Image: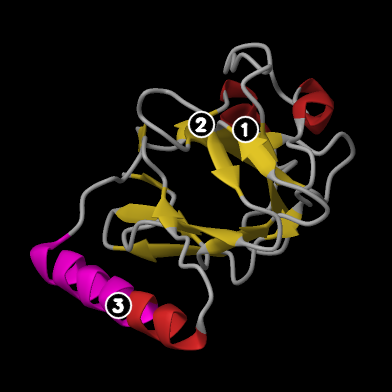
Amino acid sequence: MLQIIEREHPIEAIEAALRERLERKLCAALGVPYIAGATVGAWTVFGSFIEKVGNKLIDLDTDTFKALLVTSSWTPNTSTDDELADVSGNQAANSVTVTITTPTWTRSGATTTFDADDITFSASGGNAVARYCVIYDDTPAGDPLVCYCLLDTAPANVTILSGDSLIIQLNASGILSAA
């Protein structure tokens, strides 16, 4: 069974709150704006991703994974969207695709987890306006889609001002897991 992990332990929540407070103070001392965030909704996995992992077309240990910001012009469809071409025409202007750092696929007991470092997007040349973050595998042909999340619960657009950044804080329990 594949499920999205979205729970945090109380200690992790306290650590995150303290880290955010410190980051806000540091930004204030440096005179730069503080912009941070987290995935508002759980990550939603594309059906084709599960199939491609099962067919050994995606290697969670060695492939290169990337993320991009997508506008509200895109309507997610986990049944039919399966490659980057299905979303790339809706990429948020003034933001670039970023490589996900330190992707890991680990097992603890009966639970296997896919995780990575937090994702940072910057706006350059103007404001970047997005509604979704999409993760895809950049290694196989076609760049298969992995998962996406909403950036705001309304749902509403999120704006990154030119020169600023948005940090998508991944849950301490990983992006997704199978048990």
- Measured as percent of width and height from the top left, residue 164 is found at 62, 62
Q: Amino acid at mark 1?
A: Phe
- Name the residue type under label 3: Arg
- Mark earlier in primary sequence (1, 3): 3
Could one spot residue 53 in this view of the protein?
A: no
Mark 3, Cα crowd under 10 Å, few <14 / some 14-19 / many 20+, is: few
Which residue is identified by label 2? 45
Q: Is residue 95 visible?
A: yes
Relative to 143, say whether 74 is above or below: above
* Vertical side of 161 occupied by 44: above or below: above
Question: Which percent across, then down, holds residue 111?
Answer: 31, 53
Q: Is 23 situated left or right of 147 in this image? A: left
Give x and y (percent) for residue 175.
44, 50
Q: Are marks 1 and 2 in contact (CB under 8 Å)?
A: yes
Tag 2: Cα neighbours inside 10 Å, few (<14), some, or many (≥20)?
Answer: many
Task: Give the number of the mark in front: 1 or 3.
Answer: 3
Q: Which residue position holds label 3?
A: 19
Eyeballing the image, is 153 above or below 110? above
User: How did the renderer colour the structure?
Assistant: secondary structure
Describe the element under mark 3 as helix, strand or loop: helix
What's the mark number on residue 49?
Answer: 1
Q: Nearer the viewer, mark 1 or mark 2?
A: 2
The amino acid marked with disc number 2 is: Val
Observer-nearest of 14 and 8: 14
SS under mark 1: helix
Image quadrant where residue 171 sits:
bottom left
Numbered range of the magenta stretch? 9-23
Is 131 magenta? The answer is no
Residue 149 image label: none
